[in-house]
Amino acid sequence: MIEDTMTLLSLLGRIMRYFLLRPETLFLLCISLALWSYFFHTDEVKTIVKSSRDAVNMVKGKVAEMMQNDRLGGLNVLDAEFSKTWDFKNNNVAVYSIQGRRDHMEDRFEAAADYVKAHLPESLRQQLLSYEREKRESVSSYLSILEQRILAVDRDMVDKLSANHDEAGTTCLVALLSDRELTVANVGDSRGVLCDKDGNAVALSHDHKPYQLKERKRIKRAGGFISFNGSWRVQGILAMSRSLGDYPLKNLNVVIPDPDVLTFDLDKLQPEFMILASDGLWDAFSNEEAVRFVRERLDEPHYGAKSIVLQSFYRGCPDNITVMVVKFKSGPVGSKAEE
């Protein structure tokens, strides 16, 4: 038996030496090493590769841990994870929100989110009313109004929260609907997606993440840095590069409140619905998956919002999850929200 094993090992050794020492094999090996050295010679890329491996291992461990906890805890675990559930439905709009596996509900029950909820809608309403009255003489637009109001709310909030040493921050995603146009402003990593007349997913916003080249360069110019700790974070702290609030990072100018504002032609898109959601949903769904999933469930009481939130949770999302679905109806001049 031992002799047979030794013979087999010897044979394998000869085969490996034969292939490894062949000129074409050595040539391919040298080319591979040269390409690897060329593409991955910088410390930054080496760090990204290593951190990505660490991230994969960490996610695997977290998912396994959550699945084990769900099995062991049964209904008690689910009760705790759904302890802060919030929902809303009115005509063509439905919202569903859960705390999920987070220790706290930050999507809604948090100082920065509460401040923006209390001040931004009313501020926008007043400015829009003034704009509509003076439209002919005004040089403003929906785009500039959204940008001005968001920046103003951030300034006021930073002043107030920093006085109380409250470091809270929040994302901001606003969709403004007129007869023929949809204007969307975004700060942070909440995201909007629209389903057009053909069922295609149309991105309404783009996440502000620290690893994006534009954001990374801006942070570096401001004297900041990003590092990996479960996700890429500004100064090793914040997992998004723009936000409202977060005054310590705002004072360093490494995190900014500047919104991206995009406009969309409703006559051209003739949308069926749009999804506005916190990053918890997008940890579990791509834009296309989310549109397909909700489109099949528009007849449900929450227009699919509740179903996709729960599905995100069951897929292992570790974050708070909040989803708003807005249904549209087609008209002779395009699409508008149902009255």
Image (spheres, rainbow, N blue to C red):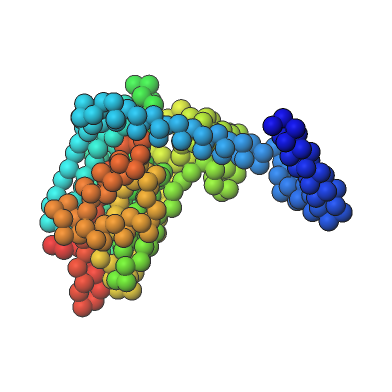
The answer to whether residue 43 is above or below residue 141 is above
Give the farthest residue toward the bottom. 332
Residue 61 image offset from top left, x and y in percent:
45, 31
In the image, 48 versus 192, the foreground residue is 48
Residue 180 image offset from top left, x and y in percent:
28, 69
Residue 227 image offset from top left, x and y in percent:
56, 33
In the image, 188 versus 53, the foreground residue is 53
The answer to whether residue 307 is visible is yes
Answer with the quarter of the image where residue 197 lies: bottom left
Q: Is residue 82 left or right of residue 60?
A: left
Write the residue at 20% across / 29% down. 75
Give the farthest residue toward the front. 1
Answer with the quarter of the image where residue 80 lies: top left
Write the residue at 27% across / 49% down. 308
All told, the count of numbered labels is: 0
In the image, 330 versus 251, the foreground residue is 330
In the image, 224 versus 44, the foreground residue is 44
The answer to whether residue 119 is visible is no
Q: Is residue 191 left or right of residue 135?
A: right
Write the residue at 36% across / 24% down. 166
